[in-house]
Image (tube, rainbow, N blue to C red):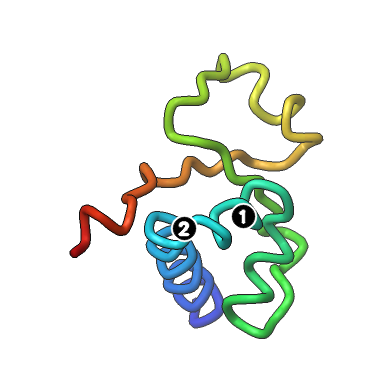
Amino acid sequence: MEEINRLRQNMAALTRRAAVDEDFRRLCLADAAGAYQALTGHPLPERSAVRFVEPDQNMPPDQTAAAGGGLRPVRLPRYLPKTWLG
């Protein structure tokens, strides 16, 4: 249970950072496991294999696993340019 909670917290932190850090967002989209390890210092657990997609990327439910090479797609939040934060 503790491992699941830690994974949820790490994924939440990852998606928050992807919303404000454009380079990190690109890493998430290109290499989800690499982004997870860059953020946490630990590898993404194998049974938690995911791929990140843009929030407006539409895929029919029956094609999500196939399109991701068997990986569960996770939508990133919209990117917030730095001008919105200033």
- Mark 1 Cα shell of 10 Å, populated few (<14), some (14-19), many (≥20): many
- Say few, some or many: other residues with alpha carbon within 10 Å of mark 2 (under 14 / 14 to 19 / 20 or more): many
Taking the image as shown, residue 83 lies to the left or right of residue 22, namely left
Kindly state the secondary structure of the residue where label 2 is placed.
helix
| Residue drawn where x is 38% and y is 60% of the image | 20
Q: Position of residue 86 (x, y in %)?
A: 18, 64
Q: Residue at x 43, y 34 (%)?
A: 55
Q: Nearer the viewer, residue 43 or 24?
A: 24
Task: Say whether disc 2 or disc 1 marks the residue closer to the N-terminus.
Answer: 2
**Residue type pointed to by label 1:** Cys
Where is residue 13? Give x, y as percent.
42, 70
Residue 3: image tag:
none
| Side of 82 where 52 appears, left or right | right
Q: Which residue is mark 2?
A: 18
Q: Residue at x 76, y 25 (%)?
A: 66
Q: Is residue 62 above or below residue 26?
A: above
Mark 2 and mark 1 residues within 8 Å of each other at the beta carbon: yes
Q: Who's the residue at 64% across and 47% down the image?
A: 29
Residue under pointer 1: 28
Picture quadrant where residue 85 is located: bottom left
Quick check: 33 above or below 26? below
Q: Real-space Cα distance between discs 2 and 1? A: 7 Å
The amino acid type of the residue labelled 2 equals Ala
* Quarter assignment of residue 33: bottom right
Expressed as whole percent of the image width and height from the top left, the position of residue 11 reads: 49, 64
Outermost residue, right direction?
69
Above or below, 56 relative to 39: above
